[in-house]
Image (tube, grey):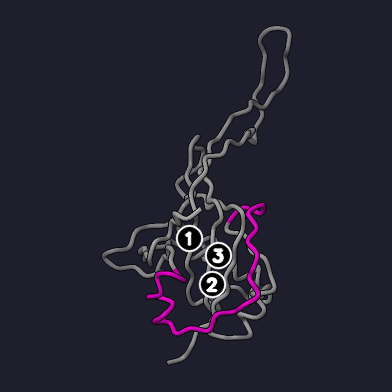
Amino acid sequence: MKNIFVVKYTGPFGFIKPWTAVRDSETYSQQFLTPSIIAGIERKLFPELLKEDEGDIKKIVGHRLSYKQVSQQQEQIQPRGWNKKSSGEEKGYHRPYAILVRGVFIEPVLWLAFSDIEDAQKAAQEHICLCRNEDMLYPENEIQAVSREEFDSNEEMFAGFELIFEKNNDSFLVGYNRFKNNEPMYGFLKVIGTPVKNNF
């Protein structure tokens, strides 16, 4: 059986904004990666894929995401637009402030699987982001060569959430793919082992 080559990424925190959360005052991090997020990570690792890009996932053949806990963090924001203030002495334009509460991953772990060892070696030299630029995950040097069966069954090493990009009776809508003319994305969630770690 042919091996796949798996790279482990870790970082202090991470956040994946759900596609339904537009202006929600309280939003917990989505626990899975959509096809467009995986495609975006691929383009960061392999910028040559941007040429004649159809938005397909070409190099990453599997992934797994786990974390230690979700921490509620406050963030001050301002809307993009301006409001006109015409009452009283202070006439002019202003932008009000608001506070958002985000449920952010603490110590996320992401495994990315490749069918080609050279792709894994290149990926193991680059940092990635789940979604926000400040949520950087860094690779570990060692690349794991395992069978697909072990990647899907080893609950100790490869525990986590993985969205399987298929449309069937178990699938649900996970957003719209910005790399493929905003076409609907579907998938079903596969859970291996205990994705939320309880050892601190």
Figure check: 37 above or below 27 = below
- Front label number (1 vs 3): 1
Q: Residue furthest left?
A: 169
* Residue type (three-letter) at the residue carrying disc 2: Leu
Q: Find out whether residue 3 is within the magenta segment.
A: no
Figure check: 133 above or below 121 = above
* Residue type (three-letter) at the residue carrying disc 1: Ser
Q: Residue at x 50, y 56 (%)?
A: 67
Label 3 sits on residue: 179
Report whether 36 appears left or right of 156: right
Q: Find out whether residue 152 is within the magenta segment.
A: yes
Label 1 sits on residue: 66
Which element carries disc 1, helix, strand or loop? Answer: strand
Q: Residue at x 48, y 37 (%)?
A: 26
Chain-order first, disc 2 or disc 1: 1
Chain-order first, disc 1 or disc 3: 1
Q: How many marks?
A: 3
Res. 112 mark:
2
Report whether 151 appears left or right of 134: left
Within 10 Å of disc 3 (Cα), the crowding (few <14, some 14-19, many 20+) is some
Q: Residue at x 67, y 65 (%)?
A: 127
Q: CA distance from mark 3 to mark 2?
A: 20 Å
Magenta part of the protein: which range?
Answer: 131-158
Q: Position of residue 170 (x, y in %)?
A: 28, 63
Q: Residue at x 44, y 85 (%)?
A: 147
Rendered image quadrant of residue 73 = top right
